[in-house]
Image (cartoon, rainbow, N blue to C red):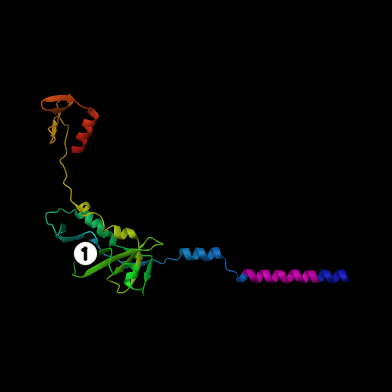
Amino acid sequence: MKRKKKLLALLGVLAALCVMTLIAGQITVDPTTEEETQEEEDTSVTVASISAADVTNLAIETDSKTLTLSCTDGEWMNAQDLDFPIDGEAVTAMLESLSDVTASRKIDEPEALSEYGLDAPETTVELTLADGTTQTFAFGNQNSLTAEAYLSYSGEDGAVYLVSSSLESAFTSDPYDLVAMESLPEFGDVLSLSASRADDYAFTLDPQAVWFLEKSGQTRAVDTSAAQSLIANVT
């Protein structure tokens, strides 16, 4: 009889444990599922979308330079130096980075601008559009954790954004990267080529494709492969 009572008690304990396990499983949140949901959530914010074709003036100011470009009849010019030839395709490529500006985070109520380096921006990009309106992008410090740049945009008063640093980099290249390079004419078979230097050395190629180095009337043969490389550089 006692053994029967003990068996019934044991069965009751097991039943209670099963019920408790079932309840705990229903109220426990799987942390893996929660993390995956957070990772899948898209928190990006659209800041601006500007067509390169709508931009008529572009002003870039950094600590080291100020560059002002203007577009007339589809041709870009350096407003500070009209003799400075500008590669229009390079400018268009730069402006296309503003066609879809997105931020990983928007701070609607930011602290003082000095907290983000926006009181004295490292780079300021001001655009004038065909309708006469202006749009300004100011880039401040980089976020120490994400390496993104803090951005203020004139189209959104008071807000501060975190954007990819590559957006700022698109406007901080050397101005000479925008120079329109002249194309040299194409050459056929080179039968004769001469080049001279200030120290009186001269290189000469005769019709038999033998290269000579000449100085003060004295000549000597030079390495053919090196000579062919010189031809390749100028043709």
The magenta region covers 9-25
The residue lying at 25 percent from left, 60 percent from top is: 95
In the rendered image, is residue 208 in sight?
no
Q: Position of residue 138 (x, y in %)?
A: 28, 66
Amino acid of disc 1: Asp
* Residue at which label 1 appears: 54
Q: Position of residue 235 (x, y in %)?
A: 18, 37
Residue 90 falls in image quadrant = bottom left
Q: Position of residue 219 (x, y in %)?
A: 14, 25
Q: Main secondary structure of the magenta part?
A: helix
Does the magenta run of residues contain 21? yes
User: Which quarter of the rendering shows the N terminus?
Assistant: bottom right
Residue 106 falls in image quadrant = bottom left
Left or right of 45? Residue 28 is: right
In the rendered image, is residue 59 in sight?
yes
Residue 78 falls in image quadrant = bottom left
Tag 1, which secondary structure? helix
Whether 85 is drawn above or below 134: the answer is above
The residue lying at 20 percent from left, 52 percent from top is: 176
Q: Position of residue 147 (x, y in %)?
A: 38, 60
